[in-house]
Amino acid sequence: MDTDGGDQKAGAQPTSTTSTGQNADYDLSTPLGTNGVGLRQNLTAYGDAHFSLFMRKLFIKALGYSEDALSRPIIGIVNTYSSFNPCHSNIPQLIDAVKRGVQLNGGLAIDFPTISLHESFAAPTSMYLRNLMSMDTEEMIQAQPIDAVVLIGGCDKTTPAQLMGGISANKPIIHLVTGPMMPGSFQGVRIGACTDCRSNWAKFRAGTLDIEDISALNEELAPTGGTCGVMGTASTMACILVALGMMPIHGATAPAVSSARLRISESTGAYAVQLAKQQLRPQTLLTRESFINAITVLQAIGGSTNAVVHLMAVAGRHPAVAGTIGLDTVDDIGRTTPLLVDLKPSGENYMTDFHNAGGMLALLHELKPLLHLDALTITGRTLGQELAQTPFRPLPPHSPANCIHPLATPLYPASSLVVFQNGNLARGGAVTKASASKDHRLLQHQGRAVVFSGSADLARRIDDSDLDVDADSVLVLQHIGPVGNPGMPEAGLVPIPRKLAALGVGDMLRISDGRMSGTAGGTIVLHVSPEAADPASVLGIVRDGDVIVCDVERRLLSVELSDDEIRRRQDERRQEQKRPGAAATPWQTRKAARGYRGLYMREVNQAEHGADFDFLTAAGPGGA
Ligand code: FES
């Protein structure tokens, strides 16, 4: 875009002075519409629109703004800085750079706070609060006089929350992520949050790392601010934002601590002014094709399983896309999309390597035959136009520094993410990241269930030396779904029982209705729906010794029980839950819960719908 800033008045709103030199905003003979621009929009309800504007201006002048400044397009900047959020530690610098970009292009930049969520500082989980953050984002965009918004996020749940809220608010939005952290080093080996957090913790549990080693690792796994430095959920969502067209192509991969990240921020401010003038809104920009591009990228990067949940929620907010994108779309696209990016947890490298190999620009060029190039982007140009005009010189394909495989020689042939659609165990669907399996034989496996009734039961018994388990067992964890364990914790990476880990068992088939970190690997089946807490669930009636069948090729996930036996056990479970003295389940008590917890438990939907609140979806009240 043109960012020469030659005309400092470019983008200014119509002058607010009359021919007599008086401020037209106070001309009572001129009606103030309800859909104005700049300060004139979303007036506070005092019953007298002119008085509302008069009040708004006198208060903002307390901050020193001139009439000239206030006549410009107003670019809101969502500030999610928090001292509890190291993934967002660079936000003050990013805001300064965005403001520079806005003001060089004739806009007025005003930042304001919303909720900030970090994975390790949100109990019970950040996912529990994602929908609250989306509501905060939507309502603050709606409430304030803003012509376009820069959404600064980064840590896992923040970007999907912002996109969900932004689509629902439907004012022009553009995303800016904080960027990935740099890798650290331990005994000459590169390490980084959080794939290496989990693998080294597993070694510590197995006794192959001692307490000094694990303490030293703790100092180095997150050596700078920024988001996790592998293809976890934060990095996945950043790449998806580019593929959707909601963030400039260079925006996904530049390190949080780089000068490139600041230049990206400045140009994001410039694009925001352009968006304000064009009034290009997300419900116009995003189409089904945008989502197909996003899912293609998700599969090609071996992205986080969490992104599947988020994409379902995001699509569900868009009136024209909701219902046209589902888990089956993710699976269908996977069958024709190879894994190209060699990053942990599916591969070996870090986000800095992806960035240095050309990042999303290189990947999108490689994926061109699979993409909808006519999809619109935030620049006002199509994805095809962006790629055609963006200079790009790929690294030699066999360069050791190139972690982006050519389409012809992929890292994994197809379906890095698989959706189970057959069998009786997950009739609403379940997801696995097949490319992150450590023992691919387990992708076609039959074994005896060892069942844990929840996280507490798991913690109590997993390392019990008397646990009846062997390497062929299937570890089943119940009741960590959206309602059963509010927030659907990332507990699906059930640890290998210590006695097996000590024997060198590195992977087992594990199944749950919960999630796992995008940085984690193993043969893990997640998001089983209906969740165990639901009286209609099959997962909830699986018992020790039942035979579980998992066949990724056939997309089959089953327990070898007849329909009659399933119904019998479900009836038995209902009777048991009604028995006097039986502990009330979250499913039973959700209507009586108070506050946000009550809202969450009553309204959250299942994973295949994105674990969104039903009333926020496009199909919800007031929707289509
Ligand atoms: Fe924030 Fe991993 S904890 S991105």
Image: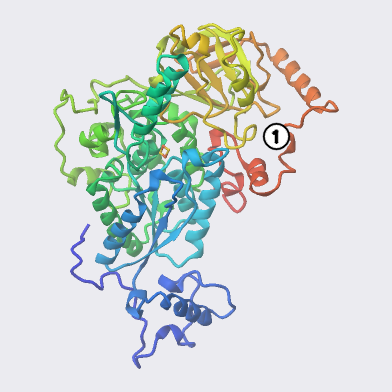
Answer left or right for 213 relative to 578.
Answer: left
Q: Residue at x 71, y 44 (%)?
A: 593
Q: In this rendered view, identify the residue nearer to me: 31 or 180.
A: 180
Q: Is residue 420 above or below residue 157?
A: above
Three-letter amino acid code of the residue under disc 1: Pro
Answer left or right for 503 relative to 261.
Answer: right
Image coordinates for residue 265, horizontal then vertical, percent: 29, 53
Answer left or right for 514 relative to 348.
Answer: right
State whether label 1 is within 8 Å of ligand 1.
Answer: no
Q: Is residue 429 above or below residue 611?
A: above
Query: Quarter for ligand 1?
Result: top left
- What quarter of the picture does the N terminus occupy? bottom left
Query: Circle 1 — which element?
Result: helix
Image coordinates for residue 470, horizontal then vertical, percent: 54, 6
Q: Quadrant of residue 592?
A: top right
Q: Is residue 2 above or below residue 445?
A: below
Q: Quick one: which residue is furthest to the front in this view?
A: 212
Can residue 154 be seen from the camera position used here? Answer: no
Q: Quick one: which residue is furthest to the right in this view?
A: 580
Q: In this rendered view, identify the residue nearer to me: 24 or 579.
A: 579
Image coordinates for residue 518, horizontal then vertical, percent: 43, 30
Q: Residue at x 54, y 20 (%)?
A: 511
Can residue 608 be seen from the camera position used here? Answer: yes
Mark 1 Cα-neighbour bin, 10 Å: few <14, some 14–19, many ≥20: some
Residue bearing the label numbered 1:
586
Q: Residue at x 34, y 91 (%)?
A: 21
Image coordinates for residue 361, horizontal then vertical, percent: 24, 39
